[in-house]
Image (spheres, rainbow, N blue to C red):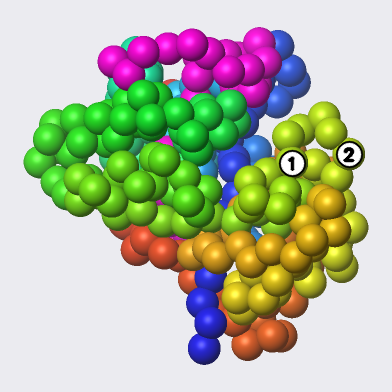
Amino acid sequence: MHRIDLNCDLGEARRGTPRWSRSLAARSGPDPADAALLDVVTSANVACGFHAGNRPTMSATAAAAAERGVALGAHPSYRDAANFGRTEMELSRAEVADHVHFQLVEMDMAARRRGTRVRYVKPHGALYNRIVHDSEQAAGVVDAVLRYAELAGEEPLPILGLPGSVVLSHAGSVGIPAVTEAFADRGYRADGTLVPRGRPGAVLTDADEVAARVVAMASGREISADDGTQVVVTAQSVCVHGDTPGALGLARRVRHALEVAGVEVAPFAQPVGRPVPRRPGR
């Protein structure tokens, strides 16, 4: 039987929006849209504050994931709240390591406060795409994961990334588990990389088309690239973006299609713990 993890980017409240204000209210809990997606997916990539999110969203989303047996991932990015982490930055290896390590510590502290743990790392947006080919910044992400492992006295957390990316190659070379990822709602180019956002075919919204593509990817079959050629995208996890229009319906359609096709939908990393209730006033 084929097996696949279904992940989603969550906790992405942005400063200045109603969602951000609601997240700061006493005992606000997770965003309702995020909570609904957590009933469908098996892994949650939670924003760590640099492109979106804050300590309350990290804490609430971690607890909600634990309640549902969903594996919790840190979703670090460039320090780029103004552009939602989608603008590339010219940073050194050391700067990337510092930024990612800080966010990983913040996310895992929030998780520990609620009786759970971060189980993997998935970089966000422009950083994710940069470390597909940039060995310097990829090494910075790997350095951050190793630094956090030393701090915690534990084995390094897996890194989730694009098949064939420099960051996964580097991770594997130093003993970090490298987990390959595909995207349910993104277009692919013939070389297996994503169609850049803003270009035709970058984001797919037809639920039936997306579901069929995910079943094909999970089963090792070809999908159509943006130029019409056929490409095989092999991955251990598939992402449905939480900010894609109709994300909940899309995620439900994808999961149903996978299960009907006989594909087991399960997290690649074992979830940890059950949530700890918040203290009054927190």
Magenta segment: 65-94
Above or below for 165 versus 92: below
**Which residue is found at the position 36% from the left and 13% from the top?**
92
Q: Position of residue 157 (x, y in %)?
A: 28, 47
User: Which residue in the protein does label 1 denote?
Assistant: 195
Residue 83 x/y as whole percent: 67, 15
Residue at 32%, 19% (x, y): give it. Answer: 93
Q: Are marks 1 and 2 in contact (CB under 8 Å)?
A: yes
Residue 198 visible within the image:
yes
Q: Is residue 92 magenta?
A: yes
- Image position of 76 (left or right of 246): left
* Residue 244 occupies quadrant: top right
Residue 142 is one of the magenta-drawn residues: no
Identify residue type, mark 1: Val
Q: Secondary structure at mark 2?
A: loop
For image coordinates 59% across by 42% down, the residue present is 9
Task: Name the residue carrying label 2.
Answer: 200
Q: Residues within 10 Å of mark 1 (few under 14, many from 20)?
A: some
Which residue is rendered at x = 52% and y = 48% of the image?
Answer: 162
| Residue nearest the viewer, comparing 279 with 164 | 164
Tell me the quarter of the image containing the C terminus: top left
**Which element type, helix, strand or loop, lies under badge 1?**
loop
Q: Quadrant of residue 142?
A: top left
Residue 32: percent from the left, percent from the top? 69, 43
Q: Does residue 67 show up?
A: no
In the image, taking residue 278 as reference, residue 227 lies left or right, namely right
Compared to residue 41, the image places residue 142 above or below, namely above
Q: Amino acid at mark 2?
A: Pro
Coordinates of residue 267 in the picture (x, y in percent): 46, 65
